[in-house]
Image (cartoon, helix red, strand yellow):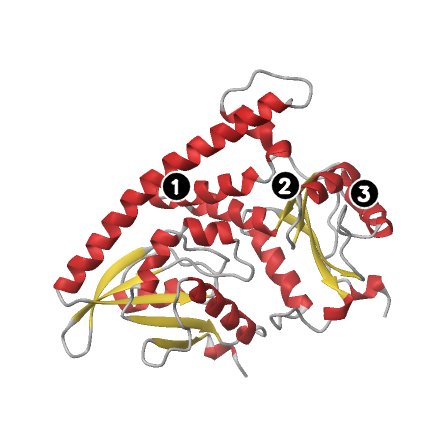
Amino acid sequence: MTEEAEESQEQARPPDAPIGAPERALVLVPVLRTRQKGTAGGRAPEARVEEAVGLARAIDRDVVYGIKVPLADLRPAILFGSGKVAELAERIAAVRIALIIVDSVLSPVQQRNLEKEWKAKVIDRTGLILEIFGERAHTREGTLQVELAHLNYQKSRLVRSWTHLERQRGGFGFLGGPGETQIEADRRALEERIARIEKDLATVVTRRRQQRQNRKKGSEALVALVGYTNAGKSTLFNALTRADVFADNRLFATLDPTLRKIVLPHGATAVLSDTVGFVADLPTTLVAAFRATLEEVAEADLILHVRDIAHPDSEAQANDVAAVLAELDVDARAPGRVIEVWNKIDMLP
């Protein structure tokens, strides 16, 4: 099979888009040839392409192509081989693509080199997920957590992101690249802002801990819904609580946590918590930043692990959820505390 035949892609649309149309994007999924049958976590390359395209569409981008790119090895300077980079450059120019999303972790050097070669904005998987979370956060707590994760991510990319920081401060229209003084000033500004956010989030942690203690005094059990993004947690939450929490067939439809009381069949009450969905390779900066929110899961008396059982990668998704729970010191296989809920069973043959 040729490399071109191995690509999973959509039909390209004409390059002339109407004014105000969504930004045109290209999604690239690097796959090492030694792992063609699936990733280390058992995920098929085709499923990775589908998910990456879904993530790009979650921020309302017009995905022109979603492509699997087989690689013999990962190049430290540019990730892909020079021939593949040149080939993609022609395609990017031909259909006027403005954003390239690489479904991998890019170093600052790789990101900068690819932007030079392709003359377009390049972001990696971490940057894309942070972008989605930034758009979906509505509460002050969620906004603070996303900003903290974003700032920690930016620290390692300070050389290339300083103009964005300057623009946030009003900007002075510098023409050249930043000197060492400017970079150091930006680093201090980042660290000061991070310290302020961490202080604000410490208040959130204290408040949530007090709320949990009050619930325990009232003998109300806490039940947490967890699962891979788009597994159907919010739909189940609405069915159980008769609430009207936003639920949609898209990745990360829910970001800010929601709690509602439910009445159990024997008359007692419990508190049900709808949490943010997990995803493969969830950035560690996000897990750390959202720890205050995710502690609702760690402290829950019962955890319902909602699975999209009809998804072809359901088992791999379950393993990804288990990995995030392990970071919260929760054993996803703990009998009696974690119950699997198999959702979307109606979509199976």
Q: CA gap, disc 2 to disc 1?
A: 27 Å
Specify the quadrant that holds the N terminus. bottom right
Residue under numbered circle 3: 94
Disc 2: CA contacts within 10 A as few (<14), some (14-19) or many (>=20): some
| Amino acid, disc 2 | Glu
Q: Which of the labelled discs sits on residue 167, or is there none?
A: none
Is residue 139 positioned above or below 344 on the image? above
SS of the residue under disc 3: helix
Q: CA gap, disc 2 to disc 3?
A: 15 Å
Specify the quadrant that holds the C terminus. bottom right
Residue under numbered circle 2: 23
Marks 3 and 1: which is nearer the front?
1
Q: Which of the labelled discs sits on residue 144, or is there none?
A: 1
Q: Going by the picture, which residue comes out furthest to the bottom? A: 349
| Amino acid, disc 3 | Ala
Residue 21: percent from left, percent from top: 61, 39
| Residue drawn at x 78%, y 60% as measured from the top left | 71
SS of the residue under disc 1: helix
Is residue 294 positioned above or below 101 on the image? below
Q: CA gap, disc 3 to disc 1?
A: 40 Å
| Amino acid, disc 1 | Leu
Quadrant position of residue 139:
top left
Say whether disc 3 or disc 1 marks the residue closer to the N-terminus: 3
Residue 270: percent from left, percent from top: 21, 68
158 or 126, nearer to the observer: 158
Say whether disc 2 or disc 3 marks the residue closer to the N-terminus: 2
